[in-house]
Amino acid sequence: MKSVTIKEVKLHHTNVSLIAPFTTSFGTMQNKDVCLVEVIDESGLSGWGETATSNEPYYNEETTATTVYMLKEFLIPRLIHREIGHPGEVHGMLEFVRRNNLAKAAIETAIWDVFAKKNEQSIAELIGGEKKEIEVGKSIGIQKDPATLVEKVREYVDEGFRKIKVKIKPGADIDYIAAVRKEFPDIVLMADANSAYSLKDIEHLKQLDPYNLIMIEQPLAHDDIIDHARLQRELTTPICLDESIHSVEDTRKAIELGSCKIINIKIGRVGGLSESIRIHDLCKANDIAVWCGGMLETGVGRAHNIQMTTLSNFTIPGDTAPSSHYWEEDIVTPEIIMENGIIHVPTGFGIGYEIDEEKLRKVLVHRETIRTGESAHPIPS
């Protein structure tokens, strides 16, 4: 395969507004600062990634501002002007920085994109993805009351989504799920708690068992795998881990402890596509189902999610809803669309979508270009 050498990196700082506010147990989001990372190789090819961050450190410790700082001061200097024989090497090249996985993933995925383009493959082909289409689920933020939630679910079921994810928190959980299940007895339904509960809530959470949920996602602390194992023993509903899983090692420990039966793989949360693939493979070997969650990404991040979800053990519909569900205009072309709950995997090289420069300009705040490996901080060899 042809190697790549990154000659320059462009950071496109954007501010994008959601069509409607999105509420979780963390709070409500109405807009996002997103940094799109464009790597340009020696032949002039571009690859794209994005910081799948929010403006505040609610999901994890990172924000868009901190990811940009890490990219400029530590990560880009480590990679620029170095020959990269395969994008799978990048994860190891960045291990000298602890955590900061969203920042690492932004540059790592961009390198996967440019490498696939240079070798005239889609990322799916490059990683051995088998699927030509992927099933899509819809994530619904916390609503003001159960009746409003039921109508939201009705809208998305009628649209064809293959799975419905409902955000919950104490005071907006049992009655909400009961109302949805009463109206829709047969849909694939799950609850996402975003760490809103503790072991004191075991008896409360048991009340969700009769509603035939495919999973409860991350009910306990964001950094826990031990208490989740105890909770899983108490529940018949499968637990899915999200925020607790940052690496294949976290995955191994969670599996050995019995902390979950399902894992949500987010490329940003685990530091890139390479680690995502390792987690996928380990889960497959241990009969742990996986699916791809969303981080309210633009089309760049969604395109990477689509490519990854072609791997065989992604057996549960993911959160890669069409662009039109979140943004007035996305920045990729063609627009990411869904037909009857299905997204057809694009066959073009790399992520399979192109950047629409005119639409990018509409949300662009400023752009900076990095051409040297200079940093204000010494980088260990």
Image (cartoon, rainbow, N blue to C red):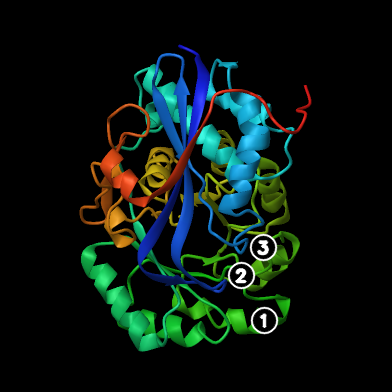
Query: Tag 3: residue type?
Result: His
Establish if 42 lies above or below 184.
Answer: above
Q: Which residue is mark 2?
A: 219
Question: Is there a contact, CB below 8 Å, between mark 2 and mark 1?
Answer: yes
Q: Which quarter of the figure is the C terminus placed in?
A: top right
Q: Position of residue 27 (x, y in %)?
A: 54, 73
Name which residue lies at 70% across and 44% down.
Answer: 99
The quarter holding residue 239 reads bottom right
Q: Which residue is mark 1?
A: 201
Residue 202 visible in image = yes
Name which residue lies at 61% across and 64% down.
Answer: 58
Residue 276 visible in image = no
Count of residue discs: 3
Q: Position of residue 127 (x, y in %)?
A: 45, 28
Is residue 365 left or right of 329 when viewed as pictured? right
Q: Which residue is mark 3?
A: 222
